[in-house]
Structures are given as structure tokens and as C-alpha cells.
């Protein structure tokens, strides 16, 4: 009787094993060899590719940065500056604001740049609802020589919106404009070169912020046109900015990105009215 039960059990096991193998073959399971455990089925290539693409899909913006370009009528420079300083002081107190820089172009004093950086999308939207913004908008309306323009950017370097926050609580001094050297470098790369340019420029920025005379080296990429970049280079003095051009990391960057340029780079020098304390321009300690 025991032998009969054993033989019946063996036949049932062979039947179950055969059924299991057939099922595995249908599912795409492979076996390493006789007596080996089955290997798990591999994902179809198309499915694996879609998962890789999904992982590489960019998430929402890291920072909400806007650079507003302003050209005022001749003779309105001081009036515009005063109105913009009042707006900047109050805007910097908004809970989501990281920076609100007021800059005046050195070789064309009728041109201004306002650099506004917020932590998320609620920041810019909320700013437009504030009384100080609405007052500024009304006050400067008749001062405009041409309509204002704004470019929306995300950050490449530093890596977080909070890294843009000034390293000091004091943002102004009684002497007026800060005696620092600020350059906005406008860059347009060839389509398809965006990723390589970002990699090379991030590496250059990471070394540049270590320079003795450097205060910050921001790299921004346009949200609407990813081939457009803005480099914000801030040095203690013009001499420090000139020394940067002789560093090994700058020379390597210049050589690396030369073929990526869709058009020559353009640099604009600015007077820094807000913040007017050099320490308020210093990049966050954790970035270096």
C-alpha cells in the first residue's frame, strides 16, 4: 500500500512539474539547467525602455526665477529706482521669496534688470496680488520707454531654490549701491547641446564659487526655450572678475562649450542697488 501511494505521489509531482514548466514557458521564464531554479521572466524591452524614460522625465521646476528687463524714459532713472527699491524691500519679506535684486546697467543707465526668485509657483502668483507690487506697477507705468519683458528661468546651479537666499539678514547700507562686480552673461546654445552645456557650465560654476574673489556664480536655464541660458557672475571687484578669465576651469569651460554656441555670448555689467551689502550676494555655505 505504501508503494502504491509513493508511485501515485510521484506521478502527481511529475504532472505538476510538467504543468509548471509549460506555464513558465508561456510566461517567458527560462531555466539555467537541469535541477536549477527558474529565472524570473525578463521585462519586454519596450516596457523597460518606457520605465527608463519615465525615470528620466524632468520633475517640476526647482526654482521659480524671473528676470525682468526694463527700459525707462530719459530722466526717469532715479524715480524708477526709488519705486523699485521700495517694492524690493517689501517683496523680500514675502514668505516664498528668495531674492529680489535691483540692478542698473553700467553703460546704459536707463536699463534695469529685476531678478526675482521664489521657492514655488505660489510665490510669483502671490507677489502679483500684494499691495506693494500693485503700487509699484502703477507708479512706474508712465516711466516705461518700452513695455517690460520677462524671461522665466529654472536653476541649474545652485541646485535648490533655498540656496539663493542671502547669507545675511542685513540687505542694505546707507552708502547706497554695493561695490561689487555683477555680470549677466546671456547664452544661446545650438539645439541638442543643452545637456552638454549644462554639465560643463555646472562644473565651471562649482569651481568658480571657490575662487577667493567670487561671491556667487548662478546658472539659469529658460523655461520657454531650453537653448537659452543666463549666467549671473558676482565678484567682489572687477579685478577679481578679470582673474576668473585666467583660471584653468574657465579656460577648459570656454574650450568645451565653444562649438555649442548658436551665437556669440553677450555680457552685461550692472550696478547693484539691492541688495547693497556685499555679504548679501554671497552664495550659501552649503553650495561650496
Image (cartoon, rainbow, N blue to C red):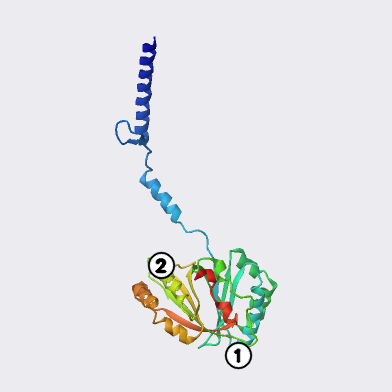
Residue shown at the point (53%, 65%) measured from the top left = 160
Residue shown at the point (57%, 67%) measured from the top left = 162
Task: Quadrant for residue 201, please give it.
Answer: bottom left
Residue shown at the point (49%, 84%) measured from the top left = 269
Q: Is residue 157 above or below residue 57?
A: below
Task: For residue 102, say whether it is visible.
Answer: no
N-terminal label among 2 and 1? 1
Q: Is residue 38 left or right of residue 55?
A: left
Mark 2 Cα-neighbour bin, 10 Å: few <14, some 14–19, many ≥20: few
Residue lying at the far top of the rendered structure: 1
Q: Quadrant of the N terminus?
A: top left
Residue lying at the far right of the rendered structure: 131
Q: Is residue 97 above or below residue 110?
A: above
- Percent of width and height locating residue 72: 58, 84
Tell me the tag on residue 170.
none
Mark 1 Cα-neighbour bin, 10 Å: few <14, some 14–19, many ≥20: few
Label 2: which secondary element? helix
Total residue callouts: 2
- Percent of width and height locating residue 58: 47, 59
Task: Compare residues 80 and 65 and report the one nearer the observer.
Answer: 65
Q: Is residue 271 above or below residue 15?
A: below
- Percent of width and height locating residue 205: 45, 73
Q: In 3D space, how far apart are the residues under numbered discs 2 and 1 (Cα atoms)? A: 43 Å
- Which numbered disc, 2 or 1, marks the residue closer to the eye? 2
Task: Compare residues 192 and 143 and report the one nearer the observer.
Answer: 192
Task: For residue 27, say whether it is visible.
Answer: yes
Residue ID for mark 1: 75
Label 1: which secondary element? loop
Task: Quadrant for residue 165, please give it.
Answer: bottom right
Residue ID for mark 2: 199
Amino acid at each position: 500500500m505504501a508503494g502504491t501511494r509513493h508511485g501515485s505521489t510521484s506521478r502527481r509531482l511529475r504532472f505538476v512539474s510538467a504543468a509548471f514548466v509549460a506555464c513558465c514557458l508561456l510566461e517567458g521564464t527560462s531555466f539555467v539547467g537541469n535541477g536549477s531554479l527558474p529565472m524570473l521572466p525578463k521585462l519586454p524591452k519596450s516596457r523597460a525602455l518606457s520605465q527608463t524614460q519615465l525615470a528620466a522625465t524632468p520633475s517640476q521646476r526647482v526654482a521659480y526665477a524671473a528676470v525682468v528687463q526694463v527700459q525707462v524714459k530719459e530722466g526717469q532713472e532715479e524715480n524708477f529706482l526709488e519705486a523699485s527699491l521700495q517694492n524690493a524691500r517689501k517683496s523680500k519679506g514675502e514668505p516664498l521669496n528668495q531674492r529680489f535684486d535691483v540692478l542698473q546697467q553700467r553703460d546704459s543707465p536707463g536699463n534695469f534688470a529685476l531678478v526675482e526668485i521664489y521657492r514655488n509657483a505660489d510665490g510669483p502668483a502671490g507677489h502679483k496680488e500684494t499691495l506693494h507690487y500693485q503700487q509699484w506697477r502703477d507708479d512706474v507705468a508712465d516711466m516705461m520707454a518700452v513695455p517690460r519683458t520677462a524671461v522665466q528661468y529654472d536653476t541649474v546651479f545652485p541646485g535648490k531654490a533655498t540656496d539663493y537666499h542671502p547669507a545675511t539678514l542685513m540687505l542694505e547700507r546707507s552708502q547706497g549701491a554695493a561695490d561689487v562686480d555683477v555680470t549677466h552673461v546671456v547664452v544661446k546654445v545650438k539645439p541638442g547641446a543643452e545637456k552638454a552645456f549644462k554639465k560643463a557650465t555646472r562644473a565651471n560654476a562649482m569651481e568658480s564659487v571657490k575662487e577667493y574673489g567670487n561671491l556667487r556664480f548662478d546658472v539659469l536655464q529658460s523655461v520657454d526655450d531650453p537653448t537659452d541660458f543666463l549666467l549671473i557672475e558676482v565678484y567682489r571687484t572687477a579685478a577679481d572678475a578679470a582673474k576668473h578669465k585666467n583660471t584653468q576651469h574657465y579656460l577648459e569651460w570656454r574650450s568645451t562649450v565653444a562649438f555649442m554656441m548658436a551665437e556669440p555670448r553677450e555680457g552685461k555689467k550692472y550696478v547693484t542697488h539691492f541688495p547693497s551689502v556685499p555679504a548679501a550676494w554671497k552664495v550659501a555655505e552649503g553650495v561650496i
